[in-house]
């Protein structure tokens, strides 16, 4: 395909168009992803997650300067499920990052959650693969930490940075349980605000309670707005990357990711092909009515439907 060829030659317009194709769930996309696959697997993926307003975009903005200074090309995917239609936050991010737009070593892309078919994680992962095939050395995925997306980012990233802010009067105990598990690096951003030191200390205590592994996640006070602590963060990211690469752990993480990806694709194919097939071939009204009136149980009904389209379990 022409676009794929252009992408592999380093054409930024092709990169943008291919991500749109993926985002819109275009029927061509499966073929495109197949063609791109042999060219992927080289980029290192950094996930940045945390509550809305914690300063993720500001942090990415600063981090980009460090990464470029080290000579790496970077792709950024900012996923913002909180504003799929208004584009408010997305526009804000764009304006903030305009400075980087002049740097051809950086490609920034915001994604909405329109691609609900197959889920946010799938569209994001595909965009990552496209940037990877394009040749970006590092790919940053910024996810607004709302519900499951915070946890899901780990499935896509090699290193995950969790962004927290000073708890102020509150105790840090309000941190969602799963979040402590997924961070490879913790950042307490807005450390210019009161309570930062205590938050760092409390997160450290929580991390000490965890079972020890070869990597103890550092807790870094950062002020993204003043560019303080960014160099240390970039250093920690490189140390974590070296740690994963050194122990064969990167391959292990990627194997786990491959399993999740495969499962997700099978689920998607079954759902889109089988369920859509059933809905177009069989009139479900009576059956649904019978189940709703409790004259028929949904378990046997589901199996009957699969039999009727000759799908064997
Ligand atoms: N006081 C303070 N505010 C910050 C800092 N970093 C970011 N902010 C502000 O926090 C707000 C949210 O930042 P943003 O990067 O959009 O957060 P995101 O929603 O997590 O991407 C913005 O008004 C930033 O200017 C910081 O180090 N200190
Ligand atoms: Mg943001």
Image: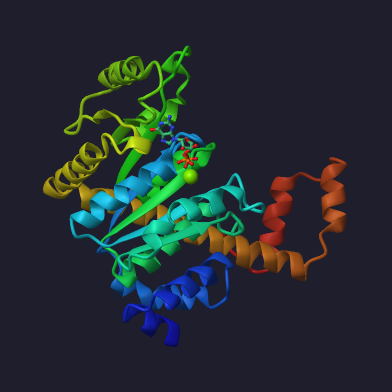
User: Residue drawn 75% across and 64% down?
Assistant: 279
In this rendered view, identify the residue nearer to me: 32 or 14.
14
Nearest to the observer: residue 157 or residue 285: 157
Q: Quadrant of residue 275?
A: bottom right
Q: Is residue 292 left or right of residue 41?
A: right
Residue 143, given in percent of the width and then of the height, sits at 46, 45
Q: Residue furthest left?
A: 246
65 is higher (above) or lower (below) than 49:
below
Q: How is the image coloured?
A: rainbow
The quadrant the N terminus occupies is bottom left
Q: Position of 91 compared to 244: left or right? A: right
In this picture, residue 77 sits left or right of residue 83: left
Residue occupying the point 43% across, 87% down: 2
The tally of labels here is 0
| Relative depth, front residue between 35 and 270 | 35
Q: Quadrant of residue 224?
A: top left
Residue 11 vertical position relative to residue 305 in the rendered view, above or below: below
As drawn, the residue found furthest toward the bottom would be 2
Q: Quadrant of the C terminus?
A: bottom right
Residue 295 in view (yes/no): no
| Camera sees residue 201 | yes
The residue at the point 48 percent across, 68 percent down is: 19
Residue 137, how many percent across, how many down? 25, 62
Q: Position of residue 176 (x, y in %)?
A: 47, 26
Where does ligand 1 appear, by image quarter?
top left
The residue at the point 57 percent across, 55 percent down is: 112
Residue 56 image point, x, y percent: 42, 41
């Amino acid at each position: 395909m022409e676009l794929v060829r252009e992408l592999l030659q380093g054409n930024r317009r092709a990169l943008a168009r291919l991500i749109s194709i993926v985002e819109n769930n275009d029927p061509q996309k499966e073929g495109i992803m197949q063609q791109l696959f042999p060219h992927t697997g080289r980029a290192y993926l950094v996930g940045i997650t945390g509550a809305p307003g914690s300063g993720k975009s500001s942090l990415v903005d600063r981090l980009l300067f460090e990464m470029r200074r080290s000579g790496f090309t970077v792709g950024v995917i900012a996923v913002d499920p909180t504003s799929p239609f208004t584009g408010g936050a997305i526009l804000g991010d764009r304006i903030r990052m305009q400075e980087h737009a002049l740097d051809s070593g950086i490609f920034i892309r915001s994604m909405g959650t329109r691609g609900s078919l197959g889920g946010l994680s799938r569209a994001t992962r595909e965009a990552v693969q496209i940037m990877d095939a394009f040749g970006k050395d590092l790919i940053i995925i910024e996810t607004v930490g709302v519900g499951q997306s915070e946890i899901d980012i780990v499935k896509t990233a090699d290193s995950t940075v969790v962004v927290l802010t000073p708890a102020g009067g509150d105790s840090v105990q309000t941190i969602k349980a799963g979040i402590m598990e997924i961070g490879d690096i913790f950042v307490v951003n807005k450390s210019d605000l009161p309570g930062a030191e205590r938050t760092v200390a409390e997160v450290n205590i929580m991390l000490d309670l965890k079972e020890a592994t070869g990597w103890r996640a550092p807790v870094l006070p950062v002020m993204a707005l003043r560019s303080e602590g960014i160099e240390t963060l970039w250093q920690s990211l490189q140390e974590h990357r070296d740690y994963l690469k050194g122990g064969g752990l990167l391959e292990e993480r990627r194997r786990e990711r491959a399993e999740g990806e495969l499962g997700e694709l099978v689920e998607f194919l079954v759902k889109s092909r089988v369920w859509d097939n059933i809905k177009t071939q069989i009139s479900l009204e009576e059956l649904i009515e019978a189940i709703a009136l409790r004259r028929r149980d949904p378990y046997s009904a589901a199996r009957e439907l699969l039999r009727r389209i000759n799908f064997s379990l």
